[in-house]
Amino acid sequence: MSVEEDFFYYGREEPAAEETGGRLPTALVFPGRKGAALSTLGWQAVYRLLAPDEGLAVERFFLGDPGKSAVSMDSDKELSEFPLIGFSINFEEEYLHPVRMLKDSGVPPLAAERPGFPLVMAGGPVAFLNPAPIAPFFDLFWVGEAEAGLKDLCIELKHHIFNGGSKDDFLDLIKDRPGVYVPGKTTNQVKRAVVPPAIGNNNEQVPVLTSPAYSCFISPEAVFKDMFLVEVNRGCPYGCRFCAAGYIYRPPRHASIDQLKEIVELADPPKVGLVGTALTDWPDLVPYINWLKNRKTKFSLSSVRADGLTVELLDILRASGVRTVTLALEGASKRLRDSTNKNLKEEDFLNAVELCASKGVNHLRIYIIVGWPGETEEDYEELSEMLEKIDQARSRGQGNKKKQYMRITLGASCLVPKPWTPLQWAAMPPEKDLKDILTKVKSLTKKYKGIAFSGDSPFQARLQGILARGNEELHKFIMIAAEKGGWKKAFKYYEGDLEKFIDHNLDKETPLPWDFIDTGINKSYLWREWERYQKAVLTPPCPAKGCEECKMCGMQKWLSE
């Protein structure tokens, strides 16, 4: 499983301009600023997949200033000069940017107004969550993992164009393939493209991520300055009922430590950022970061589960200069945490807080979510008691070490019920109710020294909910946002009913705009999990050795088809 043959990395350097003769000019667009793109692993992984191919001439585009044509970072070419334009879209709030970039570049935003080339396609998480709201803008969606066939599709398009074929003929040719959604043409369910897990060492049947993603660029301009990102695992076994990543990235897979060592040896970066949805579940986490430490490579981890934060792990983190630790509590009460299937014991969380304080962590970030279906005053009364326990755990951990006082920030975000989660049938509270809850949570922190509060925007959360759960009629709302200069103006000028997508619970038989996607998880399983949410009944995590031991959600059968 050596990666050397296909290794592709620029580091701080920029790609040299190349001739495009005989290759298909391909625009790879990140609908955000350059600094964010250079800290986004998915977009870089697609660039690394496509750019080395001799049949493609891939150039990078980032979000520029309104009213100006998008220009390549690698040449002086404008977006309209490329026959293939691919957008990597990660978040619903980005939807107005592709529309604006196309319009400002002289490319009609609506696919119906582009009978010929360019072919404008989109990929990323939103493509297999719910692409319906932006479907009228795109000729094609890649639904699933890029490693599972995206490059082959692009090369096929290159041959089709060079042989004089039309865009419409190409879309007709591919419209019903796995991983492909062509709005207005695809007639069957779209099967998500996924690279099946390999088998681990010694035939242990441990699901292995065969092609872990990694950065091809690092930069002082990046959000994570000069950080080389590597993917430790994909998918999450815990099945938290609010988390889309735990469902749309199934089956859970871990990277091989040998591969990740080889990747870092080849890149030799100044700092490594470990990316994954379940970092502390990776059995090789401690050996790997010990290896990084011994080679004097700085590293950082995203949030870790409280029950996975051990003395050994924290000692390594602190010795390596890590000053901030992030823990997710999620629900305000045990009942809500059980409802969400958090599978987290209160004592484990408090032990993690005490451990962080005892080891001299400077800043502890704790995250909760508000706006759960069925939450009550009693849940927040329990949160008040939990904050008292957290403060006491901090005091126990610190003892008399006044110089190492640990600050705590309680961050609260608003629940957005996402497609392909058991909460996809749940309503969102009104904006005023969310504001009131956040005000209440903020007031709970005021009596504690060194505990600050950071709250989400209820407006942004409800906007995200509308865009995540809407249908194709929302493209008009998105178009207004792009033309008028933002989402708040779009709310002002749009004449339709937006709240209908989020203001009431849906029943089991309600058709959902994303039903045409086949992610591998049975809809009946998700409904069962929604019912278990309402009863606060826990479901065990996915077994460590993969789908063969479980066969509950449908993924095992789906992978074998």
Image (cartoon, rainbow, N blue to C red):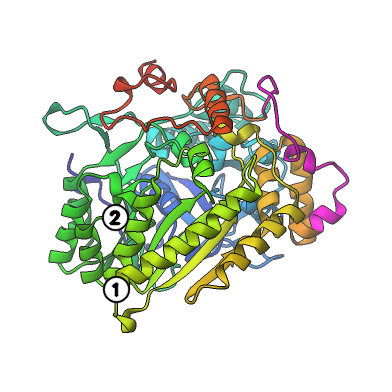
Say which residue label 2 marks.
309
Name the amino acid, label 2.
Answer: Leu
Kindly indicate the quadrant of the structure image that contains residue 146.
top left
The reply to whether residue 35 is visible in this rendering is: yes
Give the quarter of the image for residue 513.
top right
Q: Which residue is mark 1?
A: 360
Q: Is residue 551 left or right of residue 388?
A: left
**Residue 367, percent across and down?**
49, 57
311 lies above or below 358: above
Left or right: residue 178 versus residue 305 is right
Per the rendered image, the range of residues in magenta is 489-512
x%, y% of residue 557? 39, 16
Question: Magenta stretch mostly in which secondary structure?
Answer: loop
Question: Neighbour class for label 1 at 10 Å: few (<14), some, many (≥20)?
Answer: many
Query: Residue 7: x and y, percent?
Result: 25, 50
Disc number at residue 277?
Answer: none
The quarter in which the N terminus is drawn is top left
Residue pictured at 18% horizontal, 61% vertical:
292
Query: What residue is drawn where x is 58% and y is 18%?
Result: 188
Instruction: From the viewer's perspective, tell me whether residue 193 is left or right of residue 339.
Output: left
Percent x, y for residue 492?
Answer: 85, 56
Q: Is residue 6 magenta?
A: no
Residue 20 appears in the picture as rendered: no
Look at label 1 and name its amino acid.
Gly
